[in-house]
Amino acid sequence: MRPDILNPYFAAITGLSGIGPKLAKPFGRLLGREGEPRLLDLLMHLPASTIDRRARPTLAEVVPDTVVTLELVVDRHVPTPRGSRAPYRVYAHDETGDIVLAFFKADRSWMERLLPVGETRWVSGTVTLYDGMHQMTHPDRVVDAAGLAKLPPIEPVYPLVEGLGQGHVRRAVEAALNETPELPEWQAAPPGIGFHAALRLVHQPRETLDASPLGPAWKRLAYDELLAGQLALALLRAQTVKEAGRPSLGTGALSERIVRALPFSLTGSQTQALEAIRADLASKDRMLRLLQGDVGSGKTVVALLAAATVVEAGRQAALMAPTEILARQHLKTIEPLAQAAGLRVALLTGREKGRARADILAGLAAGVVDLVIGTHALFQEGVVFHDLALAVVDEQHRFGVHQRLALASKGEAVDVLVMTATPIPRTLVLTYFGDMESSELREKPAGRKPIDTRAVPSDRVDEVVASLGRALAEGRRAYWICPLVEESENSDLQAAQARFEDLRHWFGDRVGLVHGKMKGAEKDAAMAAFAAGETQLLVATTVVEVGVDVPEASIIVIEHAERFGLSQLHQLRGRVGRGDAASTCLLLYRRPLGEIARQRIEALRASEDGFFLAEEDLRLRGEGDVLGTRQSGFPGFKLARLDVHGDLLTRARAEATAIVRNDSDLLGAHGAALRLLLHIFERDVAVKLLKAG
């Protein structure tokens, strides 16, 4: 139950004076709510900038193209001649000079009431020079002396949608501030301004800094949001760990056979990660660990050795991947090693049907299958394990938390290892994976060669095709990546289908095609033909982004590289450089190149370090896009800006950890205030974990 003190915040904005059904729709669009927007949504819609109306120069002192407030005497009106497109002009002066106020499509009687001849009015807006004369087109404000007394010296400027003006939002926000109360303090070291007071100061700034993300009021609100997120994760972790784990103590026998069968030695960071994972598996607490690895750093081998540890203890493991291609790729890597060690492995995706599927399910239930690799088919109802001890979730950001929990619920006190091949910036690890311990694989296995990365404008595509022809004649293999599957009317991107047809014209049956809209069996056949060398050039969409491993491929062409994020470009580039041949990545871009796209391509050319590139990606794109969270249901921030407030995360995590250590049920007065915080930032999952109180 939500505490009563919060009811005003969660009241519908249609309860505010002046917001009827007609305005409710654009407000709904503005605030991004499908249901009826609430006062809370409105108050969290913070200004994008401010207008400082404190500058009150004379006309002689005006600096052109700045916002000023002028005290003027109105001289005369020159209405727009009938049929003309010229503006309605009002001439005015002060003791130092003259100015023209210009209005398009103005009504004469309304203008004469607004600016009566002979009267003094205060006019605020941007002054320009036109034909050597001062001019202000469509002033923001025209007021008399009484209006001037009420005119805020600094006004917020809000992002808008069609159907709303600044005045609509400002009036609604003012009403919402007056309807909502201050709340009890939840921060351990409060900054001297309360939550509601901080909202008021950002929306009704006294100084320009007050409405800036760098100002103390906004920082207070950002910290509240980060604290709510960290507290929710800490409660989730406490709850998971509280459900005591079952220690899995391996003998090391299977693991040793796997390591002997490896064609390379484990890297230092693989060994380190394994030690941490085995310590987690052996402890009486449940494991919840994130394993981040750069492209080709060997996460699958670490996952296999973790699985071997629980199998040595007489239990089972499952590895869940987001796509069939990736699940089959894991199987391809794991199967020969598992066979060498005597580990029994099965694959379960949506494609296993009939007798084959029934046999796999029976094997899992009887404990005959030690390790199952699959897609989300693994957590469906009919799948029963004999004794699941370890759930490995690959590319976690493609799944929701609920899917992770659904797989973990297939056994008793299941340990969870989450893997990602997209290195995640430190701030995002804290934000989205703060309920987990974290291990990083930063080294590449020995023998990985550097990749020659070049940027080529798309108007030179014929040269690229010609040089590709020479490479294919030498027996080399290449990927050609396109952003879309088929031409769409609203897009000018070269689609995979069209590019496939074009390249077949040059290279015939040596060209294959794989994209997300193909049936699973078709995709597998296309990948198998490429891996076997039956086709030499594979045209593909980003389905090959992770996990696809064809060591013979040494060239990758990425079309419309300017449209991809930096981490995604790095992932795609990682499909080559896996074999003995020198590898090349060609980034085809359309001119003119925007500034951010240029920086992205330069960063990619300068570095192959995925962790460095992830931080760059965050700087260039913002947190929601880096993890693909705009699409995958992660909570983006409403108030916190990680580029500005990222340093507050560590403090928020430390405070959240201390809260849960001392009062994991959030009881007492401070606990009650923290429950309000969780409700305000809609971390309802965490609230539900708490006992009543």
Image (tube, rainbow, N blue to C red):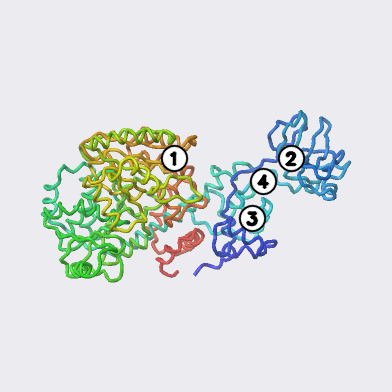
Secondary element at image label 2 = strand
Residue visible at 72% across and 40% down in the picture: 125
Of mark 4 and mark 3, the one earlier in the sequence is 4
Task: Report the amino acid beneath label 4.
Answer: Glu
Residue visible at 41% across and 33% down in the picture: 460
Q: Nearer the viewer, mark 1 or mark 3?
A: 1
Of mark 2 and mark 1, the one earlier in the sequence is 2
Q: Nearer the viewer, mark 4 or mark 1?
A: 1
Residue placed under numbered mark 2 in the picture: 137
Q: Nearer the viewer, mark 2 or mark 1?
A: 1
| In this picture, residue 645 sits left or right of residue 175 | left
**Quarter of image, res 659:** bottom left
Residue placed under numbered mark 1 in the picture: 562
Q: CA distance from mark 2 to mark 1?
A: 38 Å
Q: Nearer the viewer, residue 5 or 28?
A: 28
Of mark 1 and mark 3, the one earlier in the sequence is 3
Of mark 4 and mark 1, the one earlier in the sequence is 4
Q: CA distance from mark 2 to mark 4?
A: 19 Å
Residue placed under numbered mark 3 in the picture: 173
Q: CA distance from mark 4 to mark 3?
A: 12 Å
| In this picture, residue 481 sits left or right of residue 679 | left
Secondary element at image label 3 = helix
Task: Report the amino acid beneath label 3.
Answer: Val
Residue 596 percent across, percent down from the top left: 47, 38
Q: CA distance from mark 4 to mark 1?
A: 37 Å
**Quarter of image, res 8:** bottom right
Residue placed under numbered mark 4 in the picture: 155
